[in-house]
Structures are given as C-alpha cells and as structure tokens.
C-alpha cells in the first residue's frame, strides 16, 4: 500500500499548483451587500465567503466580526464542523483509489471487533445508510477533561447500530469515527497524520485536526450548549480542538473548506480516479428518506460517498436556484461548502454563528447572491 500511495503522491505533485491557486479579495458587490444585509437584520455579526468559478483563482470576501468582536479576514481560520466529514471521506476514497481498500468492503473485514459490522459496508457508512447511531453515547465517552480521540474511537467501536442497513438515511458521527479507525489501521498513523498525508498536503490546504493552530481561530457564537463559556466549549476551546474529531474537528480557512468540496468535482483531476469521483457524486441511497435530525429531514434524501447531494431538498442550506446536481456539506458552526457543476461555480460560506437560523436562512441568503 505504501508504494501505491507514494506513486499517487508523485502524480499529485505535478498538479498541486492547480489547487494552490492565489486567493484574491472578492470585489463582487452583491455578495458584500448580502452579508451586510444579514448583519443589519441581526442574523449574524460577520461572514467569510470564498467563490471559485471554473478554473479561475479562488476569490474571497470577509465582512464584519466574529463572536469575540475580532474582524474576520479572508484567511481567518474557522472550525468547519461537519465539513470535516468531507476530508474523512476523501481519505477513504484516496485509499480506495490506491487499491488499499474497496468501498464495498464490510466494516467487519477491517474492524472485526466493531459492534456495527454485520452487513455494513464502507459504502453504507459513507452514505449514512448503515443504521448507525447519530453520536457516541455520553456514558461511553463522557465529555470531560481527559477525553481524547483513542477513547472516542473505542466508544465508536462499541456503539451498536440503532437501525437496519438500508432502512433510511440516518446521519451519523459514528460512521466517520469507524472510517477514521480503518484509515489508521491501514496507514499505521494517527488519523490526523494520515489526513495530512492523504488529503491536506496533496490539496495544499492550511488545515489542522487535533492541535491548536499557529494562529487563533475565529470565535463561534450562538447556542453552544451547556458547556458555553467553559474550558470545554465546543468549537472554541483547546480541549474541543484536541479531540481530533473525524466528524467535526477540522480547523481551516473558508477557501480551503471549499477545496474539500471541489475535490469531489475533480480539482485537481489526478487527486482521485474519474470513475471513483463519478461514483462518489452518484446517489447511493436508492431513494431512501431521512436526513440529519433537527437540521433537516426529507422524504427523499440523496447522498453520495461522503458528499451530500442537493436534489430537491427543501428547506436547505443552499439557495433555491442551486441545481439538483449540486453537492457539498454543511457544518453546525455556521458554514457550508458547495459546488454547482451546472452553474460552473463553487462556494463556501462561514458566518461564525452556530444556530439553525444561520444554516437555513443566512447561508441560502448569501448563496443566492453568489449564484446571482
């Protein structure tokens, strides 16, 4: 497997300049106006938007401040929550492209001790049809000082399914946890180190998992639960960042969050085989309904191999004008990274506000200005 990955890395070096494009300040008035309109309405305090049109350089605009009142900048580092799942899926797809695994492998083939293994394949896990629980039970890994990724990994392995395979789309954090353990066992590295090798470095990203970044991330506002204002605060604390959550712990800038979504669109072209990319963007659910609990449920909930598909979902975090063929992922820290191949444009938005209003109102509002 090591030789396969080294050959893939050599190929990527030839195309790395395609991804490491110059990030420029976006001067598009409508996008700035949309952000300012959202600020005036009291929805948010600021936002960063990154836009990529075809093969043009990524452009960014930053307006307003974060939850601590610090100005947002085009290169501000931000916790991107569940957009992390795109990076985890890409790591698995890279290993599949290198021949180290097959997406139809059974979870039990790689994790024989996993409670959720019977009839569950990596394909089921990637498209959330494996019947997995939505999260690790609190009693299995108490959220308190001393918790770390190895303890969370053991809890993921021990958590039994809550539904049948192929029954419905049941959005899960357990799934990416199991995938991360598989990546660790195949590479012999910690998941964060494997992500660096398989995804972050090849794509030229400034991205951090499991560590405090060298410059302070922007602070997320909104309802952060019972640990708000403590050393355990989600998104904003060193403790939370140390957990290296493969389903939600990534810190990166908005343009590089967009790069994760664009990797599913073939940017750069040598990152993944074309046939695997096409499969990743194809609905894997067979018409099942379901969704993401309080964040959205739909009678038809299409999902690819790690990437969410827009189709006819409404309400949604993308604008109504986004095509049914568009895809990407949203994050509960107030962000979305999305690509619309029909319009030939990709965008990422981060409003540094962890609320349902941000996901269902502000992100489509600003997204409409991007597409318009």
Image (spheres, grey):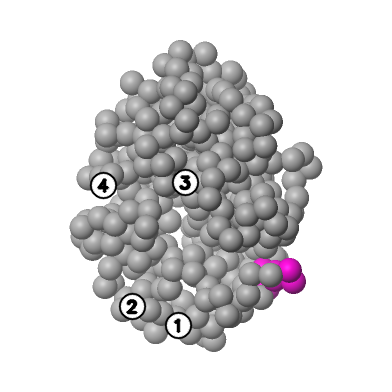
Residue 98 pos. (x, y %): 54, 59
Q: What secondary structure is marked by label 2?
A: loop
Please name the residue that numbered disc 4 is placed on: 313
Start and end of the magenta stretch? 145-150
- Disc 3 versus disc 2: distance between alpha carbons? 28 Å
Please name the residue that numbered disc 3 is placed on: 355
Callouts 3 and 1 close, C-beta under 8 Å: no
- Disc 4 versus disc 1: distance between alpha carbons? 29 Å
Instruction: From the viewer's perspective, tell me whether residue 270 is left or right of residue 133.
Output: right
Mark 3 against mark 1, which lies toward the viewer?
Answer: 3
The mark nearer the N terminus, 4 or 1, is 1
In this rendering, the answer to whether 234 lies above or below 328 is: below
Mark 4 against mark 3, which lies toward the viewer?
Answer: 3
Q: What kind of secondary structure does the magenta stretch mostly adopt?
A: loop
Please name the residue that numbered disc 1 is placed on: 160
The mark nearer the N terminus, 3 or 1, is 1
**Which residue is nearer to you in this view: 46 or 83?**
46
Residue 206 included in the magenta stretch of the image: no
- Disc 3 versus disc 1: distance between alpha carbons? 30 Å
Does any portion of residue 263 appear in the rendered image?
A: no
Q: Quadrant of the C terminus?
A: top left
The mark nearer the N terminus, 4 or 2, is 2
Q: In which quarter of the image is the N terminus?
A: bottom right
Instruction: From the viewer's perspective, tell me whether residue 40 is left or right of residue 188.
Output: left
Q: What secondary structure is marked by label 4?
A: loop
Please name the residue that numbered disc 2 is placed on: 163
């Amino acid at each position: 497997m090591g030789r396969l990955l080294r050959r893939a890395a050599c190929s990527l070096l030839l195309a790395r300049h395609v991804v490491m494009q110059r990030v420029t300040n976006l001067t598009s008035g409508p996008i700035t106006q949309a952000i300012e309109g959202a600020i005036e309405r009291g929805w948010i305090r600021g936002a960063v938007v990154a836009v990529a049109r075809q093969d043009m350089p990524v452009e960014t605009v930053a307006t307003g401040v974060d939850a601590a009142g610090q100005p947002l900048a085009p290169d501000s580092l931000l916790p991107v929550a569940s957009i992390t799942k795109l990076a985890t899926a890409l790591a698995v797809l890279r290993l599949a492209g290198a021949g180290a695994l097959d997406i139809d492998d059974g979870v039990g083939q790689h994790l024989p001790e996993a409670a959720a293994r019977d009839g569950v394949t990596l394909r089921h896990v990637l498209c959330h049809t494996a019947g997995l629980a939505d999260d690790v039970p609190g009693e299995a890994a108490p959220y308190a000082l001393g918790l770390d990724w190895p303890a969370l990994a053991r809890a993921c392995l021990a958590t039994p399914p809550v539904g049948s395979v192929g029954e419905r789309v049941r959005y899960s954090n357990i799934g990416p946890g199991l995938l991360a353990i598989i990546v660790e066992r195949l590479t012999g590295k910690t998941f964060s180190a494997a992500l660096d090798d398989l995804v972050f470095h090849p794509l030229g990203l400034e991205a951090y998992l499991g560590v405090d970044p060298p410059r302070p991330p922007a602070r997320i506002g909104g309802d952060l639960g019972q640990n708000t204002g403590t050393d355990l605060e989600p998104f904003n604390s060193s403790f939370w960042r140390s957990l290296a959550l493969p389903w939600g712990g990534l810190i990166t800038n908005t343009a590089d969050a967009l790069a994760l979504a664009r990797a599913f669109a073939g940017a750069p072209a040598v990152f993944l085989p074309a046939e695997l990319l096409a499969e990743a963007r194809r609905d894997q659910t067979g018409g099942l309904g379901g969704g993401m609990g309080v964040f959205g449920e739909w009678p038809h909930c299409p999902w690819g191999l790690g990437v969410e598909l827009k189709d006819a979902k409404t309400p949604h975090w993308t604008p109504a004008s986004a095509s049914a063929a568009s895809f990407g992922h949203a994050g509960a820290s107030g962000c979305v990274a999305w690509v619309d191949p029909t319009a030939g444009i990709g965008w990422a938005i981060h409003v540094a506000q962890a609320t349902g209003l941000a996901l269902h109102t502000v992100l489509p509002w600003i997204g409409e200005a991007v597409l318009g």
